[in-house]
Amino acid sequence: MRPAPTILHLDMDAFFAAAEQAAKPSLRGKPVVVGGVGVRGVVSTASYEARVFGVRSAMPTAQARRLCPNAAYLSPRFTLYRQVSDVVMELLHALSPLVEPLSLDEAFVDLEAGGVPAETAAVRAVGERLRRDIRSATGLTGSVGLAGAKMLAKIASEAAKPDGLVVIEPGTERELLGPMTVRTLPGVGPATAETLRRAGIHTVAETAEAGEAELVRLLGKAHGAGLYAMALGQDDRPVVAERDAKSISVEDTFEVDLTDRMRVRNEVLRLADRCVQRLRAAGRSGRTVVIKVRNYDFSTLTRSETLRGPTDDPAVVREAAVRLLETVDTTGGVRLLGVGVSGLADFTQEDLFAQLATEREAAEAATAAAEEQAAGEREPHAAEEEPPRRWYPGLDVVHDEYGAGWVQGSGVGRVTIRFETPWSAPGRVRTFAVEDPALRPGEPLPLVGGAPADGQSSEPAILPKFLSPEPGDTGSVGEEISRR
């Protein structure tokens, strides 16, 4: 435990929803829900205006619609969120070399490692300056917690929401934690809380009073001892700049249950390819292939197979995933499929069978291509029909005549667009045919900084400060980027 509150925890406020409100003037001050918009969608983030109605993260979208039918329900725009997150993380790295990101919108910072004096006034000043810099650079707000331990800093940032700062002075931990529910402590989920409730333990103070021996009896040695230390406000976990991933996975939820066995198999193959792409992008390989199947009745099964060595060969992962799928009964209908790889490593062990499988696949592909070419010489191909456009609510668009806007809704062959930008007044709504040739997908516009010259930005949605023009600079940001 540190004698000064030099561990900072930043948590952006309703991040996805706040970014959408900043980008769409007509939604500011109104309930906004970001997540899956289909009948089986799940809420990712709800704005504070929507939370008043009881909408929460991880809630089924159908339930959220019943609670708050007048909210704007938008599909996520991860391109925008990652760009904003990069700017926020850049600001954090300017404070200290020890930054531990937990997600796109949340991170711990070790201010002591950044040379900040171990004094309450000094760390508070850094926290306030960080909040101002985030608002200036992104137009969004974040809440800051400062304490002598990671657990306490996170509790402080939660207490600071929205758009606030809370400092927990060392020595006041037990007084602060005592009246809080036991669910406040890290690692206490519904099952652990129920076990403690049956033993008459409801608050953090009651957890501490129960004693380590009783908690070990109830929860086991490791969990019980750790929970007792946290109930006393003791948490010596360091801020770790790089956290090693334990697994890499992808999954999809389907709007309609999949009952066709071949369709299920093809989806598993597609997910396996996406998983390998992520694996290679991270420069890793893996030894254990895992599939996840959620049935029509919400029962979830996982199956795994451990290979002889780590691999990043897509053919090996696909074959293992299909073998695992054969052990699962999917006749009742599948609502979710996932493929993952664990047992990660930084090297790939050559596998003779994988090499043979890859060569066999290449030979089959070459044969199929030759047959297709021969068939094409015999008779012309019929013109392939392009799949119909899908305009998801919230996504960016550009119209040749009206400029930049976003999809407000679509259906029955029509799409409704609201034409507005982050720096404009609430815009007008117009409706077009979904195949209107003047309408095309767009890119996220800057949340701060004003309109680009052509009405549609090709630059990142948010510019880091080191790329922002200085006062009096006559050069453009685009010229600065090209020079770099």
Image (cartoon, rainbow, N blue to C red):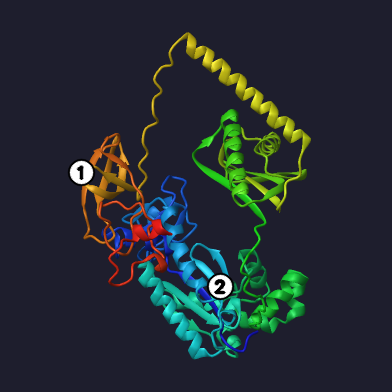
Q: Residue 424's image quarter?
A: bottom left
Give percent across and percent down for residue 157: 49, 76
In the rendered image, the residue lying farthest to the top is: 378
Q: Splitting the image into 4 quarters, where does residue 165 fall?
A: bottom left
Where's the N terminus, which quadrant? bottom right
Residue position marked by numbered label 1 in the rendering: 401
SS at circle 1: loop
Given residues 149 and 285, the one toward you in this image is 285
Q: Residue furthest front?
A: 483
Q: Residue at x 44, y 65 (%)?
A: 87
Q: Secondary structure at mark 2?
A: strand
User: Can residue 121 be spotted in the picture?
Assistant: yes
**Kind of residue indicated by mark 2:** Phe
Q: Residue 482 placed where, x, y %?
A: 39, 56
Residue 72 percent across, percent down from the top left: 33, 55
Q: On the rendered structure, is 29 left or right of 354?
A: left
- Residue ID for mark 2: 108
Q: Is residue 85 left or right of residue 52?
A: right
Sequence order check, earlier mark of 2 and 1 = 2
Q: Up-down: is 69 above or below 152?
A: above
